[in-house]
Image: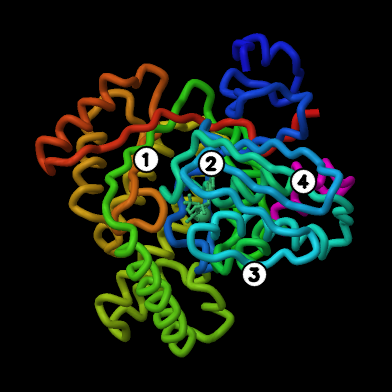
Amino acid sequence: MSQSFEQRRGQKSVDEWASDVSLILDGNTNEGIRASAPGRVEFIGNHTDYNGGWVLGATIDRRVEVVLQRRSDRQIRLQSEAAVPPVEVPLGSVERQSGEWAWANYILGMVEVLQGEGMTIESGFDLRVGSTLPVGAGLSSSAALELASGAALSEAYGGEFLRRDLVRMAQRAENEFVGVPCGLLDQAVVALGGADRLVRLDARSEATAAVPFPPETGIWIFRTHQAHALSESGYQERHDEARAVRERLRELLGNEEAEYLVDVSPSQLEEVKRELSRTLYRRARHVVTEHRRTQRVVQLLKAGRRSAAGRLLFASHESSRVDYENSTEALDFVVDRLAEQEGVLGARLTGAGFGGAAMAWTRAGYGEEQAHEVAGAYADRFGTELETLACRPAPGLYVWA
Ligand code: ADP
Ligand code: MG
């Protein structure tokens, strides 16, 4: 506790070492097994995942860290520095928690899934959680908590799982134990992301790949703090609309042409435009074009064409705004201000929309001053604070040896 960060850092060598790796919880790495997982942001690929399309995500340098110590008895004791009560359960009867204890489910879910995969947890343990990642902000603190806990448990009890196994197990913990029907993106980015890359998920095959993230560029997140409840009902409505238009397109084009919405080409969509309501046509147009924009961004990043890739981020926002109608006046305002600034390669709403956050992809020179300019204009216009977070892709999940 008395050691400086530099001293603590000197004790360890980690392959993926980067300047943004830090110890969040007090103490040194000898006192237990330490695991760390970053948050993530959706770089492009808005509402493409449940339509069988591509999504690109980036890890961010805000993290969840856990320290696990084995106990000699069979109690599990969980504690977080976030404002949540500690949870204590016997190893033999791990049950889903509710109310203010529900935060423990992300960890208990991993306990259940790891055991289901054949790992024996022969003793109880204490697990402490620390975090620099905003909770419930669409930055995937849930996946970071699952993966940091899962990796620490696996290390403590000889799980020997591969990273990609943990990705699946974390998704199962969230789907089955926590009860949130999330896709694979959050867990895949948190576990497989890194400082030098974005993670591409093909939602159809669930295959992932690394895409080079241009050095000396950064990511800024602008949180509007608009209502989350709205986001959930809006998300469900878009989900239902996407299913409805896919079914209609199957009737019009045949099953093979429209297994997923992203299978329909922009020109096929134009051909049957008159058969669709204006709303459903626009929903389909967003998904169909967003999937292709995401594919194009991958090509452009591989070719080092930053400006062209950045323009597609702006195009993504425009498509969300006009066709998917999941933007808000506040998000549009932020993206419009960003579009006027030097050093912004691209900007768009990120995540479900209907409030939430926008992100900007920036050149090296972009800094606090410009971000505060946007926040200042926002405060003048809406009378509320715009929270700005300077981020950049960061090492994915790791365990301290
Ligand atoms: P997001 O993943 O976007 O942050 P979620 O609603 O999926 O939002 O997950 C947030 C939940 O994860 C919190 O309500 C809490 O239960 C749990 N959680 C995340 N970080 C922590 C933490 N540091 N301590 C305790 N619980 C946490
Ligand atoms: Mg989450």
Residue at position x 46%, y 85% in the image: 247
Q: Is residue 194 above or below residue 27?
A: below
Q: Amino acid at mark 1?
A: Met
Q: Secondary structure at mark 2?
A: strand
- Name of the residue lying farthest toward the bottom: 251
Asked if the residues shown at circle 4 and circle 2 are in contact, with their CB atoms under 8 angstroms apart, the answer is no
> Any mark on residue 39, and which?
2
Asked if the residues shown at circle 2 and circle 1 are in contact, with their CB atoms under 8 angstroms apart, the answer is no
- On-image quarter of the N terminus: top right
Q: Ligand 1 near label 2 (Cβ, under 8 Å)?
A: yes
Task: Assess disc 1: are there few (<14), some (14-19) or many (≥20) residues with their C-alpha within 10 Å of its C-alpha.
Answer: many
Count how many numbered circles sit on residues in the image: 4
Q: Position of residue 108 (x, y in %)?
A: 68, 58
Disc on the earlier residue, 1 or 3: 3
Tell me the quarter of the picture where residue 238 sits: bottom left
| Residue with the mark numbered 3 | 176
Q: Amino acid at mark 4?
A: Phe
Q: Secondary structure at mark 1?
A: strand
